[in-house]
Image (cartoon, rainbow, N blue to C red):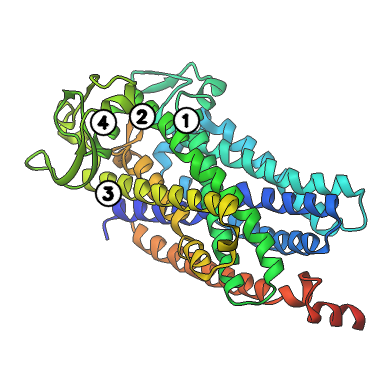
Amino acid sequence: MDDFIAARAQMALSLGFHIIFACVGMVMPFLMAFAHWKYLKTGNEIYKGLTKAWSKGVAILFATGAVSGTMLSFELGLLWPGFMKHAGPIFGMPFSLEGTAFFIEAIAIGFFLYGWDKFNKWFHWFCGFLIGLSGLASGILVVAANAWMNSPAGFDYINGEYVNIDPIKAMFNEAWFPQALHMTVAAFCATGFAVAGVHAYLIMRKKNVEFHTKAFRIAAAFALIGAFGAPLSGDVAAKSVAERQPIKLAAMEAHFETEKGAAFVLGGIPDEEKGVINYAIKIPKVLSFLVSNDFNAEVKGLNDFPRDEWPPIAVVHYSFQIMIFFGVVMICIGSLYLYTFFFKKHWLTKNWFLKIFFFATPFGYIALEAGWTVTEVGRQPWIIYGIMRTADAVTPMPGIQYSFYFFTAIFISLSLIIIFLLRRQIQMVPRLYDPTDEQFNLKNKKS
């Protein structure tokens, strides 16, 4: 494997793995805090057990995210020394603030896990809520650093030197809000559907039904917030991309020729040599409207840009289509849930209804990974957009492919450990978390 390809593959694998835990850390504590709030308001012991069960899951996934995030930090220096040499002093602030948020999150997790019956009940609840706030802040700060790579700001680039550095301006660059908003909404959608899907499956197994039903409905509500918010945040992000990175937008749509009243493309197979897209469904003038609120606005095509600045068109286009497809599917599932909840409540317990959510378990994360592929691959060949090419930032150290194999083995091992730990947590629900279960009451009597 070529060292440059190995370096990019390792970074892609690491980011793709870590982003799952970053999203869980941003959202799962809010589900936990909501269940805890329900317990404090109603006194229903099921919500207490649910809070404890989810808190253990949060702790497991937090630890894994900490490991993968630390590995990413080392990889930036290991694989991209040219990038870190120049970029580190400019966008280091969000990373340092993210470290602060991480430590607050770790302390809050410790307080929450060991604070039962020791703290004031509302302070204890706030510790759980603080886990979510700090996790959310942590994710947004990392996205701010990534946004800077897509929209460099806070410095002047003169004769190959980075001068007049302003870290505040770098952090709050033009891309940070659209990216952070879309990422946050996507995290709620992905995590909500994943948790709802797991509990839907457990309901179908007819064990601890009341416990898992309450969990399912909380998770589904959060999933709906993300599903219906995604098109709105996506629109904000797309308009931002059209303004700052028109070549990325053109790659997303495999849009080769500049034209007014450009069509929005669904599906299709791009042919880069001929500059056309085959077998696509084209919706006239919609792309122009989406990027500028004008059906007749001009949208630049790929052929207006130098060929050596094109990102991999097929990868970007297919990833964008995957993101849209699963996003639409989740909106449809969310609409079905709302209709069922308000007009057909008896459907909520039907196996066919629960199976829909079970099969949708990975949909949010598939869309999320596809969206990040669009963001990162669509920026190529630049690591700092318009300033530094990725090929110029890679380490000259040979043998990177072995590093790639090693890190891949670590991620596979971590995945297996997580599956084992989470499976064990689910198996312990009857004994540790569900007060309506005979095993739970028997254990408490013995203790």
Q: Is residue 441 visible?
A: yes
Image quadrant for the C terminus?
bottom right
Q: Say whether residue 60 is left or right of residue 125.
A: left
Circle 3 Cα neighbour tier, 10 Å, few/some/many (<14 / 14–19 / ≥20): many
Look at label 4 and name its amino acid.
Ile
| Badge 3 or badge 2: first in the primary sequence | 2
Q: Nearer the viewer, residue 92 or 185?
A: 185
Q: Secondary structure at mark 4?
A: helix
Which residue type carries mark 1?
Pro
* Residue 248 percent coordinates (x, y): 29, 34
Q: CA distance from mark 2 to mark 1?
A: 9 Å
The label number, if any, that marks residue 318 in the structure image = 3
Circles 2 and 1, Cβ within 8 Å, touching? The answer is yes
Query: Mark 4 vs mark 3: which is more N-terminal?
Result: 4
Q: x and y percent of residue 299 in the render?
A: 23, 24
Quadrant, the N terminus: bottom left
Q: In terms of image quadrants, where is residue 442? A: bottom right
Q: Earlier in the sequence, mark 1 or mark 3?
A: 1
